Amino acid sequence: GESTTIGKLMKITEIFDGVKKLAESGVPLLGTCAGMIVLAKRGDEQVLRTKQPLLGLMDISVVRNAFGRQRESFEADLNIPILGEKPFRGVFIRAPAVKEIWGDAEVIAEFMGKIVGVKQRNIIAVAFHPELTDDTRLHEYFLRMCRGDG
C-alpha cells in the first residue's frame, strides 16, 4: 500500500531519520491518510506483515483501510473543533483510523465511532485528504503551528 511504500522510500532515500529528528526537535508535521500510518507508533496486522517502517512519532495505534477498500471511498462532514464550528468535508480514500491513543495524543476528529484526526504536540495526523477540498482551514491551522501561533 501507499503507506508501506512511503516508509520504505523514506528509508531508501535516507530521509527517515532526518524527518524523525526534525519532528522530535519541535518542527511541525502534518500527515494525511497514509501519512497518519507512517507517523504512528503501532500498526495493525497489515503493517506488521509488510514490515512497514513507522516513524513512531505519535502515541497512536492505527488500522489500515478502516472503512473498506477503494470502492468504499466516501466524503463526509466532520466536526473538528480546532477548525471552528463549520463542518469540514473529509474525503476518505482507503482511509485508516486510529484504534488507540495514549500519552498526550488527543483526538481532534471522529467519524462513525472511529478516530480520524489526532494531534500530539507539534504533529497532526488525519485519515482523510484535506488537499482534495477547497476548504483550507486545516492547512491554515498547520501553517499557524509552523509560525508558532497554532
Image (spheres, helix red, strand yellow):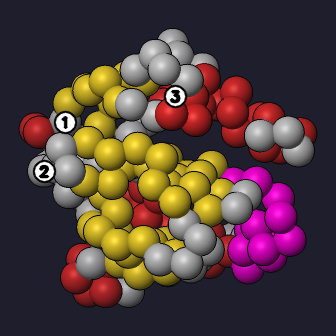
Q: With respect to residue 33, does 90 lie above or below?
A: above
Labels 2 & 1 near each other (Cβ < 8 A) = yes
Q: CA distance from mark 1 to mark 3?
A: 16 Å
Question: Would you say the magenta stretch is mainly helix, strand or loop?
Answer: helix
Residue at x 65%, y 57% (from the top left corner): 123
Residue at x 47%, y 77% (from the top left corner): 102
Q: Which residue is mark 3?
A: 131
Q: Which residue is mark 1?
A: 73
Q: CA distance from mark 2 to mark 1?
A: 7 Å
* Badge 2: residue crowd in 10 Å (few <14, some 14–19, many ≥20): some
Q: Considering the image in quadrants, where does the N terminus appear?
A: bottom left
* Badge 1: residue crowd in 10 Å (few <14, some 14–19, many ≥20): some
Q: Which element is circle 2 on?
A: loop
Residue at x 70%, y 27% (from the top left corner): 140
Q: What kind of residue is marked 2?
A: Gly
Residue at x 27%, y 78% (from the top left corner): 44
Asked if the stretch drawn in magenta spans residue 112, the answer is: no
Q: CA distance from mark 2 to mark 3?
A: 21 Å
